[in-house]
Image (cartoon, rainbow, N blue to C red):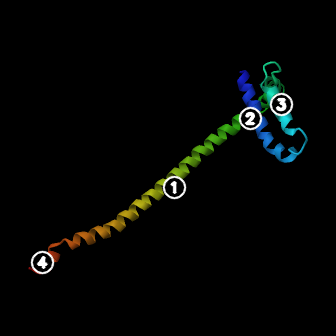
Amino acid sequence: VRWMMYWIVFALFMATETFTDLLISWFPFYYEVKMAFVLWLLSPYTRGASLLYRRFVHPTLSRKEKDIDTFLVRTRERGYETMLHFGKRGLNLAATAAVQAAAKSQGALAGRLRSFSMQDLRSIPDE
């Protein structure tokens, strides 16, 4: 549980760090403060990740649990519908390509078979 709390808080930190690096990286000792914060999160003595998780992350997730569940159900349904749509579209494209290839190759095959017909063989002069 301790590592789960750490990784959740660390992931949130990394997500916010992307934007804060652009805005305040010019601040003196910015990178040193970031390093100290990560060590504070990780330290078994300070239990910074557990503190932040219990105080901020867990209450927020608990309040928004129904919204998150609704979003996940809606996303699953949309994902299924999207998969069916693109699956049908892919099968239609594959069937069209197969029919076109068969139609093109049929003409080539007929021409090749015609060249081996008896009429063509009779037209070859005897030597």
Which mark is first along the chain, 4 or 1?
A: 1
Taking 5 as reference, is 77 above or below it?
A: below
* 10 Å crowding of disc 1: few (<14), some (14-19), many (20+): few
**Distance from Cα at disc 1 to Cα at disc 4:** 50 Å
Which mark is first along the chain, 1 or 3?
A: 3
Find the residue positioned furthest to the right.
28
Task: Give the position of the C terminus as an image quadrant.
Answer: bottom left
Residue at 82% across / 24% down in the picture?
A: 48
Decide if residue 98 is on the left or right side of residue 73: left
Residue 70, disc? none
- Residue type for callout 2: Ala
User: Mark 2 falls on what kind of element?
Assistant: helix
- Between tags 3 and 1, which lies in front? 3
Which mark is first along the chain, 3 or 4?
A: 3
Residue matched to label 3:
37
Residue matched to label 2:
11
Residues marked 2 and 1 touching at CB (< 8 Å): no
Percent of width and height locating residue 59: 81, 27
Residue matched to label 1:
89
**Distance from Cα at disc 2 to Cα at disc 1:** 37 Å
Residues marked 4 and 3 touching at CB (< 8 Å): no
Residue matched to label 4:
122
